[in-house]
Image (cartoon, grey):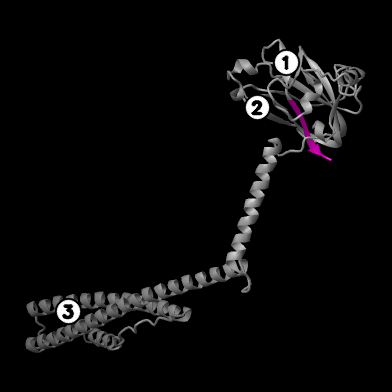
Amino acid sequence: AAAAAAAITATAASSTTPTKPTPPSSGATAEQLQQVLDTLSTLVGDVSGLRTKQSGLQEEQQRLQSMLVSLADRPDPTTPGQELNSGVHRQLQQLGADLADLQTSTASTAERLHGADVLLNSSLQTTHTAALSVAREVAALKATALSPAPPANVDQEALRQLVHTEVVGEMARTVSLLAADKTGLTDYALAAAGGKVVRVNGGCWTCDDSQVMRLFQALGLSLISRPSQILEADMTPGHCWSFRGNASAVVQLAARISVSAVTLEHLDARLLPSPGEKNISSAPRHFTVYGVATPDDEGQLLLSGEYKLDGPPLQTFYLDSPSAPLDFVRLVIHDNHGQEYTCFYRFRVHGST
């Protein structure tokens, strides 16, 4: 018992004196954070060791109390009972003092552990704030590098006015282009630009350069319906090429182009005196376009399409890919939407030279 008490006394005496945690500074560094983590790890180990020692002292206290009770019941004949009893009491008193010291050390270590935890949280918060600040500075530097400020001698208001003028001007030019021909695409079949009909159904006595038409012109006469009217920009009601059944026309283009699209246009039913589908059912329906090398050539199929009454008056049809350069195209109108005569108003050919 004396040896156990001496060991307990030596262990209690070796306990570390408690220290108060130092408040974290605002400039906590990574090294300080690592020191806090190391201190916290050490304190956790100290607490574990103290708890083990406390458990051992409690067991020793219980063992000595049991021994005291046993000796009181069965005194040793060679040892005076009062002396033995007194020695055991002294050991128990020392053991109690050791236990008290151990509890104080445990409380002090717990206090140090709490302080280290507070310091760790403060350091983590400081590090997080510093990281956010650095991230914001990096983002600001990137924005400055990618969007350099205009030179100091540039008048900002004048620059805004210039940009506004350019944007409005470009919009006006685009609207003007669309208003000029409604597609924004160059029409290489336009009669005013040099396009003309050179064949109709294999011949063309009604073409502008035929002998019959030259005679009519010499006499001051004109036909109400001519194939060349499909190449003119006049959309006056009745100003169309009228024919019965199907028909074909070979168009000489104003320039040699790679054809990319064609446009068919009919009157807008809303502009007629009695709007309605019945008034525009003379519009062409199914059609085919061929690329031809000469007016008499059968040509190569470019596209087939259908002009739909429920669509807009102006309908553009695109080729899958631009054609080879062409001087002529042949248009075949197969039928209309139910009238006896087809009335064809406008045909356009688009592409690039």
The reply to whether the magenta stretch includes residue 138 is no
Q: Main secondary structure of the magenta part?
A: strand
Magenta span of residues: 346-353
Q: Which residue is mark 2?
A: 313
Q: Report the disc number at residue 64.
A: 3
- 15, above or below 307, in the image: below
Badge 1 crowding class, 10 Å Cα cut-off, few under 14, some 14 to 19, many 20 or more, is many
Q: Separation of disc 1 and disc 2 at Cα?
A: 15 Å
Question: Residue flagged by tag 1: what amino acid is it?
Answer: Thr
Q: Identify the residue at horizontal 90%, vertical 18% (top origin).
A: 215
The one nearer the camera, 84 or 21, is 21
Occupied quadrant, residue 55: bottom left
Q: Which residue is mark 1?
A: 342
SS state under label 2 = loop
Residue 350 position in % (x across, y down): 77, 35
Q: Earlier in the sequence, mark 1 or mark 3?
A: 3
Viewer can see residue 226: yes
Residue 91 position in % (x across, y down): 17, 86
